[in-house]
Amino acid sequence: MRKPLIVGNWKMNKTASEAAAFIRDLRERVPASPHADVVLAPPFTALESARSALGSSSWISLGAQNVHWEPQGAFTGEVSAPMLRDLGCRYVIVGHSERRTLFGERDEHVQKKVRAALKHGLSPILCVGESLADREAGRTESVVTAQLNGSLTGLSAHDLATITIAYEPVWAIGTGRSATVEQAAIVHRSIRLFVETGWNSDIASAMRILYGGSVTPQNIASLLACDAIDGALVGGACLNLDSFATIISFAQIPRA
Ligand code: 13P
């Protein structure tokens, strides 16, 4: 049984002091639980204050929203994997659709980021997902498979064991229009099959595949009730204490 993972992606929201206050409130509000893992991904500027608000033995792990593939150098405005590790990050989101569509990130960049993260001890959360035009043209599976191929080719089974995949249909992000559980489950199953075919069934069955796109306190329970869905990558709803606490609480209910 895979343990649910809830990842809160704050995107470009919350200052360092707002981050610290939110985390202190969240820790008071939600008790630790062995039944779910939680990752919070603040903007780079809030990582340090988030780390101190989380404390050294927190049940909430720290993640970053992006990483450059080089460890250091003349890359103005970029942040490297060793820098993120040094700030206490354990995870990093790579290939988010906003990076792909707004900042021109392609699979070749995503692949380099995944490799850099793995090399420096960060667990990548690899985002894949189709646009509305792709879905309407019946290209969902081929687009997702191409993204997986472009980002994961050549990695070892050991590498794959450290990766989480997040299926985020672009049309569901920030729109209030979540994929249905059935739509998500179909893609999740094809992702798991891709991993099984490319590596092996042990890696595939252990891998956590998250759903992202308009996840809310209202739909989290039905998403998590599906055995193909191992958690959520949450955007808008993780900015609000009540809604994020509720989402985490649902994930903490032991799964049958
Ligand atoms: P929303 O939950 O706001 O749709 O965002 C999802 C997302 O992009 C998380 O990475």
Image (tube, helix red, strand yellow):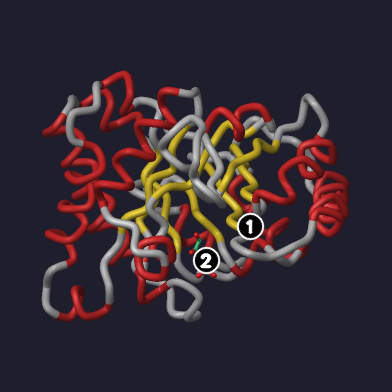
Q: What's the residue at 20%, 27% (across, down)?
A: 201
What number is the disc on residue 215? 2
Q: Residue 158's x, y, as percent? A: 31, 19
State whether residue 171 is above or below residue 215. Answer: below
Q: What's the residue at 27%, 73% (across, down)?
A: 131
Q: What's the residue at 38%, 52% (across, down)?
A: 95
What is the total number of numbered labels drawn onto the structure image? 2
In the rendered image, the residue lying farthest to the front is: 74
State whether residue 256 is above or below residue 41. Answer: above
Q: Residue 46's x, y, as percent? A: 74, 50
CA separation in Å, label 2 and label 1: 9 Å
Query: What residue sits right under mark 1 in the picture?
Result: 247
Q: Residue 65's x, y, as percent? A: 54, 50
Foreground of the two, 181 or 44: 44
Q: CB of mark 2 within 8 Å of CB of mark 1?
A: yes
- Could you tell me which quadrant the N terminus lies in? top left
Q: Residue 97 lies in what quarter of the image?
A: bottom left
Q: Residue 123's x, y, as percent? A: 47, 32
Amino acid at the residue labelled 2: Val
Foreground of the two, 183 or 221: 183
Find out if the beta carbon at label 2 lies less than 8 Å from the nearest ligand 1 atom: yes
Q: Residue 89 vs residue 197: left or right?
A: right
What number is the disc on residue 148? none
Q: Residue 10 vs residue 4: left or right?
A: right
Amino acid at the residue labelled 1: Ile
